[in-house]
């Protein structure tokens, strides 16, 4: 039985025939309709097979309500029409701004494009600002590799950009005493991934964290966890890129591309047509839409929204 047939058999069992899988351009494409967003995401996870397919195109229709469309800028002019640039970076979040800043080390023209009226207006400024030690990742994952390499870079980057940064560490605490044995084994795994740890008994934890629950019997301390203001860092990256001659085009949405011989010739925007030699897709939750414009559709993103509550008035 082929992989697709086995997958369809599994999907039929999970969703009563509402979802169908087929192969398209080396990817698994899912179609059908469901009224639960979590089920749509679950179907996407079910279809993943990194060894056999490039990616998953999850085109399952969500029937419960309309999905909000990408907000378009209200401005329409020709401010950037016929501009030629060496590199166009689409998306001025933390990734796009960092890339733009790095590229300005070279003698090239760099343009950072974002549809919002300022940089870092989405996920890059809507998070808890933690620089993660990577304890919940698996050894060998691409994300784990870059999380580990990126973590150690923050001290110097924030110093260079004059952005506040500290490493208060992260604590993983337990109540039941048998977790001490489990964590002892886990520490060997974290050590293999290069993540430093320290075991702390209840007394030491209470000295470190006054007011911690009396039910806590111990925990693991991860000293490489850090805290940074995400919006300050994005702004600093973008400002430094501009200082180094990059151009930032805000209120500028990429709405289409001209493709010739599998190469991007131009970007169509609400502020004119831009002609880049190279395009870098850093568009966050809309990066699948940008990839699709470039005829490079091999993934889809199903965004979810959450809430972070900040109680510290000093932040």
Image (cartoon, grey):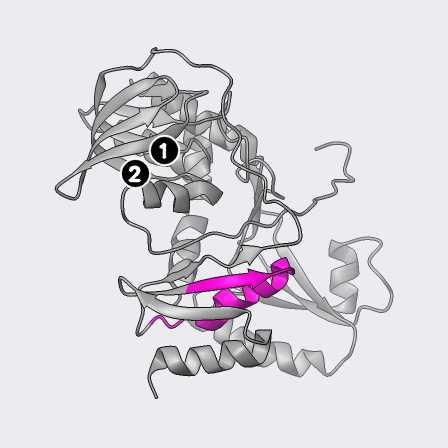
Looking at the image, which is closer to me, 142 or 29? 29
Residue 297 appears left or right of 164: left
Residue plotted at (55% across, 49% down): 303
* Quarter placement of the N terminus: bottom left
Marks 1 & 2, CB-CB < 8 Å contact: yes
Instruction: Locate residue 2, reporting x and y percent.
Output: 33, 83
Q: Earlier in the sequence, mark 1 or mark 2?
A: 1
Please tell me whether residue 76 belongs to the stretch shown in magenta.
no
From the viewer's perspective, is residue 254 above or below residue 29? above
Residue 68 appears left or right of 118: right
Residue plotted at (47% across, 14% down): 75
Looking at the image, which is closer to me, 136 or 9? 9
From the viewer's perspective, is residue 33 above or below residue 15? above
The part of the chain drawn in magenta is 30-50
Instruction: Locate residue 4, reporting x and y percent.
Output: 37, 77
The answer for how far apart the CA atoms under marks 1 and 2 are is 6 Å
Residue corresponding to mark 2: 280
Number of numbered discs overlaid on the protein picture: 2
Q: Residue furthest left?
A: 261
Crowding at mark 1 (Cα within 10 Å: few <14, some 14-19, many 20+): many
Residue 193 appears left or right of 105: right
Could one spot residue 66 in this view of the protein?
yes
Q: Which mark is residue 90?
A: 1
Residue plotted at (37% across, 26% down): 113
From the viewer's perspective, is residue 124 above or below residue 201? above
The local secondary structure at tag 2 comes to strand
Instruction: Locate residue 121, reporting x and y percent.
Output: 54, 30
**Quadrant in the rendering for residue 253:** top left
């Amino acid at each position: 039985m082929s992989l697709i047939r086995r997958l369809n058999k599994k999907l039929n069992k999970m969703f009563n025939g509402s979802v169908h899988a087929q192969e398209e351009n080396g990817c698994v494409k899912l179609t059908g309709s469901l009224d639960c967003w979590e089920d749509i995401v679950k179907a996407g996870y079910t279809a993943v097979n990194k060894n056999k397919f490039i990616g998953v195109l999850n085109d399952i229709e969500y029937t419960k309500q309309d999905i909000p469309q990408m907000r378009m800028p209200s401005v329409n002019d020709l401010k950037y029409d016929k501009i030629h640039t060496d590199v166009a970076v689409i998306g001025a979040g933390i990734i796009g701004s960092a890339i733009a800043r790095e590229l300005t080390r070279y003698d090239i023209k760099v343009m950072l494009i974002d549809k919002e009226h300022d940089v870092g207006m989405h996920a890059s400024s809507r998070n808890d600002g933690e620089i993660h030690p990577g304890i919940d990742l698996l050894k060998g994952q691409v994300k784990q590799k870059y999380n580990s390499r990126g973590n150690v870079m923050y001290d110097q980057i924030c110093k260079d950009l004059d952005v506040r940064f500290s490493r208060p560490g992260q604590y993983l605490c337990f109540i039941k005493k048998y977790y001490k044995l489990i964590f002892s084994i886990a520490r060997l795994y974290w050590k293999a991934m290069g993540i430093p740890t320290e075991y702390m008994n209840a007394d030491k934890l209470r000295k470190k964290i006054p007011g911690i629950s009396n039910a806590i019997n111990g925990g693991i301390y991860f000293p490489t966890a850090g805290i940074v203001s995400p919006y300050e860092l994005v702004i600093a990256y973008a400002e430094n890129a501009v200082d180094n001659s990059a151009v930032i085009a805000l209120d500028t949405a990429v709405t289409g591309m001209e493709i010739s011989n599998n190469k991007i010739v131009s970007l169509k925007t609400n502020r004119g047509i831009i002609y880049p030699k190279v395009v870098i897709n850093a568009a966050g939750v809309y990066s699948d839409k940008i990839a699709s414009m470039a005829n490079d559709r091999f993934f889809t993103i199903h965004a979810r929204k959450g809430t972070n509550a900040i109680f510290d008035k000093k932040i």
